């Protein structure tokens, strides 16, 4: 089992697949899959009861951990001039 640097609640970026370039918060981790908050798809909830109508709901899509990288928002660095000694 590989040690993951990804933790629940941290931001992550998808680097390949259908959700490429998506930056979102990690909802849950179930090795080797990662579930992101904004990576969802629509699915009908088919109920066995005839009286209840099927409803469209969003379901989290599992993404393999090799397609996800930890993402840290960085403030733009301010470049400072370096003075050379003469």
Image (cartoon, helix red, strand yellow):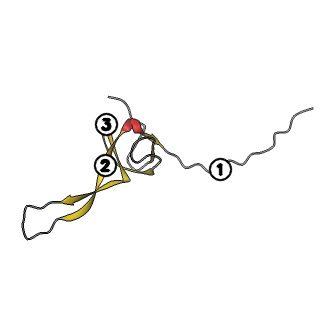
Pick whichever of labels 1 and 3 is earlier in the sequence: 3
Residue lying at 43% horizontally and 40% vertically, measured from the top left: 16
Which quarter of the rendered picture does the N terminus lie within?
top left
Pick whichever of labels 1 and 2 is earlier in the sequence: 2
Work out how far the residue at label 3 is from the one at label 2, CA to CA, in angstroms.
Answer: 13 Å
Q: Quadrant of residue 47?
A: bottom left
Which of 17 and 28 lies nearest the eye of the viewer? Answer: 17
Pick whichever of labels 3 and 2 is earlier in the sequence: 3
Q: Are marks 1 and 2 in contact (CB under 8 Å)?
A: no
Residue indicated by mark 1: 76
Work out how far the residue at label 1 is from the one at label 3, CA to CA, in angstroms.
Answer: 33 Å
| Position of residue 37 measured from the top left corner of the image (x, y, whole percent) | 37, 54
Q: Residues within 10 Å of mark 2 (few under 14, many from 20)?
A: some
Residue indicated by mark 3: 32
Residue indicated by mark 2: 61
> Quick one: SS at disc 3?
loop
């Amino acid at each position: 089992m590989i040690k993951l640097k990804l933790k629940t609640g941290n931001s992550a970026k998808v680097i390949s697949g259908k959700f490429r370039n998506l930056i979102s918060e990690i909802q849950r981790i179930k090795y080797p899959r990662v579930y992101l908050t904004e990576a969802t798809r629509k699915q009908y909830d088919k109920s066995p009861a005839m009286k209840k109508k099927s409803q469209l709901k969003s379901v989290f899509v599992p993404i393999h951990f090799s397609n996800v990288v930890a993402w840290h928002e960085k403030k733009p660095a301010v470049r400072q001039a370096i003075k050379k000694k003469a």
